[in-house]
Amino acid sequence: MPQLRSSARLALLRSRKLEDQQPAEPPVAKPVLPAPRKRVPVPAVRGRYAAGGGGRRGPSRPAIKEPYFEDPPKAVSARTRVSEAKNPASNKVADRSQKKAKVAEGLAGKGLRMDGESAEKLVGAEDESTTSPIPERVHVGNSPVYLTERKLGKGGFGQVYVGRRLSGGTARTGPDAYEVALKFEHRSSKGCNYAPPYEWQVYQNLNGCYGVPSVHYKGRQGDYYILVMDILGPSLWDVWNSLGQAMPPHMAACIAVEAISILEKFHSKGFVHGDVKPENFLLGLPGSPEEKKLFLVDLGLASKWKDSSGHHVDYDQKPDIFRGTIRYASAHAHLGRTGSRRDDLESLAYTLIFLIKGRLPWQGYQGDTKSFLVCKKKMATSPDMLCSFCPAPFKEFFDNVANMKFDEEPKYAKLISLFDGLIESPASRPIRIDGALKVGQKRGRLHVNHEEDEQPKKKVRLGHPASQWISVYNARRPMKQRYHYNVADNRLQQHIQKGNEDGLFISSVASSANLWALIMDAGTGFSSQVYEISPVFLHKDWIMDQWEKSFYITAVAGASNGSSLVVMSKGTAYTQQSYKVSESFPFKWISKKWKEGFHVTSMATAGNRWGVVMSRNSGYSEQVVELDFLYPSEGIHRRWEHGYRITSSAATIDQAAFILSKPKRKPVDETQETLRTTAFPSNHVKDKWAKNLYIASICYGRSVS
């Protein structure tokens, strides 16, 4: 429960309420055992619309003669906060147009069969009973007049119908097509908010981009914004289902090289897709010249990776925001980091492995902690385990993309070349690889030697979880500092008393194996101090009693058995404090308190519980958070480059969190270093002291994966 202390309004101390718990996410359907694997050509499945649904389409109903079909997983909007229920994850729609009369024979009177579709109700979709009826005829911009025919599906904010030209039209695709996909979004929907959908802006920038279907016409008619696009064929999800839920590696290799090529062109326009997965890769319309051509659809979650001046967007992390589909999202997307090119490629790696193996190790998690558990599993799964039974190029591809830096430019040609040995002759290719072949021709012209590479990358995701001591050191003028570790409860008092006698006060505390570590120094500026060891994590009554005596929390630690050590001091600049105990890292609450003028001044964990203390008049102007399932080295270094310094740290056996702050008064020496050690860093502290580097923060917990 967050607690608040103010000398003016002490009554507010007992008015704080627990924050709402994160709502449960609907469970993902578990796959049934696949049928025996057979070499089956790509099926001529009924046509599908090319218009994306902004990451908010529902799944399609099960195919009539394919009882083993699995429903596709759900996508979550970039504007969806993980801890809020008002914008739940929405499903994608796998839509199909009807084939010709001979294919529809026997289905008369049953309407359009939509292969792979589910009857599951879509939460957050447009309520058709409260919106205007769909126009019977569509005419937007300079488009022909289309008759609105059968419904293909609906998503979070839109509905898709088949449109047939009232007159003329001889082509199967393009502006002169006699049958198109019409996507309707009501102007009052969340995707529009009385303005053209965001997806329109993306298509405007990408129109004509290789592998992205073209928008032929768009405009507003009545209460609806309407996109006119080609109807496409089956998705890779449908193809995977038709092959017994296990795709041959040579086919996955064709998909890999062509998808990399499409993403290269997509990224060259300054965008990242944000929701790469099997359902968003479609083949061309069956029976057309493009029936084996791959297309990337659904641009509703796309975002810019570079600004208008051509520079990479700034790095940031907001742990309460997730975008994408949980099964295929990158680990960085789970953690709320700004999207960049590496995320699309990591999602592609998961897509390819899923298509070959039919399952990913993190499928099956349910409940309100699903995203957390999936991300934890992704970080703890070694590349060898993830890519077992896959040909070597798929593991090498994953190794390359999973260890990319935030703003690193992918080596697309090198990534494509990894699969050269798996690509069959043109006559045997189930997927056209036109884009990849062009990249290969360019590669040949440039005489690139892909065996030559820079120094080997440090692999940060090894799938071997471990906990360490994480210590932070700040440059300071020479002063006296003392440390104690492996201290039992009954020995704590004598160490503290001796330090006080020598003019030292506690500046930092931590715990490992239910034993305490404390740092005492002469540079705190405190005039007096009290502490309590309690079996209750952050004992409310004792803390409130000390607040009344003008003590403020200056250091906290929690043990794995649930007990806590709280240190409160006089002589601080704080004027008000609030704290919160939570089962998960309370970033939403922290963000709220930032707006109220508070800053994080202490953190601790007990088991898997987090305790965060925030204070007014902390001396900081800005703060950011780095939260990860391992030590977030890249994020911390990027924050350092922008003038932030670590001011609080805490870790559980699963995650490590760091608060980085900008002080209002810039220190003379901004040097800061971190150190991770298996044992308490007693052998290193004296070396740091010799360089006038003193322990500023210390914790024990997850730092390696």
Image (tube, rainbow, N blue to C red):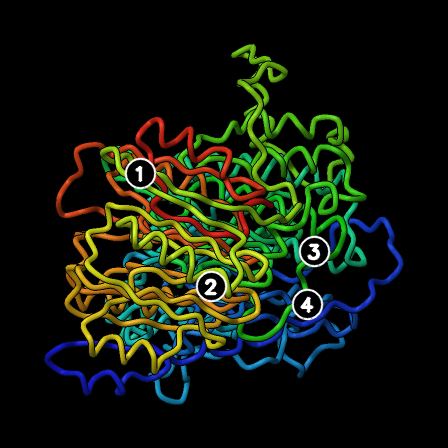
Which mark is on residue 360?
3
Q: Distance between the residues labelled 2 and 1?
A: 23 Å
Q: What residue type is labelled 3?
A: Leu
Do the CB atoms of the residues marked 2 and 3 lie less than 8 Å apart?
no
Would you name the residue on which mark 4 appears? 364
Classify 10 Å Cα crowding around label 2: few (below 14), some (14-19), many (20 and above): many
User: In the image, 6: left or right of 452?
Assistant: left
Mark 1 — residue? 474
Residue at 86 percent across and 62 percent down: it is: 35
For the residue pair 320 and 298, the one nearer the viewer reads as 320
The residue type indicated by label 2 comes to Thr
Label 4 element class: loop
- Residue drawn at 34 percent across, 48 percent down: 316
Q: Which of marks 2 and 1 is nearer the N terminus?
A: 1
- The reply to whether dot 4 and dot 2 touch (C-beta < 8 Å) is no
The CA distance from mark 2 to mark 3 is 31 Å
Residue that badge 2 annotates: 605
Q: Is residue 194 above or below residue 652?
A: below
